[in-house]
Amino acid sequence: MKYVKIINKNTIKYGNKKYLKLENKQIFNPTEADLISNGYFPFIESEIPHIVLKENQSWSPLFILKNNKIIQSWEVIENVSIQS
């Protein structure tokens, strides 16, 4: 099982199951309780949907915390073209 922490709605940080560095201590071989108490939750990944998007669109990951699990979903974003 992978454990992650949400940084923002589109960014996660993976936890290390062998080593957890905190502000004032280090935990080697952290337990599930250690990871959860420091914001790392089990990660449920999902594949990018197989839907054809418009030329100016792309998929962006979206992460939410639900029932003590971090669930990945996908949202369509509009790509902004830069004109020079």
Image (tube, rainbow, N blue to C red):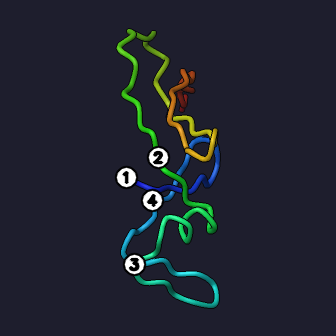
Q: Nearer the viewer, mark 4 or mark 2?
A: 2
Residue type pointed to by label 4: Tyr
Q: Tell me the SS state at disc 1.
A: loop
Q: Residues within 10 Å of mark 4 (few under 14, many from 20)?
A: few
Q: Residue at x 49, y 17 (%)?
A: 56
Q: Nearer the viewer, mark 3 or mark 2?
A: 3
Q: Residues within 10 Å of mark 3 (few under 14, many from 20)?
A: few
- In the rendered image, residue 66, in percent from the top left (x then y), is placed at 64, 39
User: Is the C-beta separation of discs 4 and 1 under 8 Å?
Assistant: no
Residue type pointed to by label 2: Phe
Residue reaching furthest to the bottom? 24
Q: In this view of the protein, which residue sits in the foreground, 27 or 31?
A: 31
Q: Which residue is mark 2?
A: 43
Q: Which residue is mark 1?
A: 1
In the rendered image of this protein, does residue 68 appear above or below residue 81? below
Q: Which residue is mark 3?
A: 29
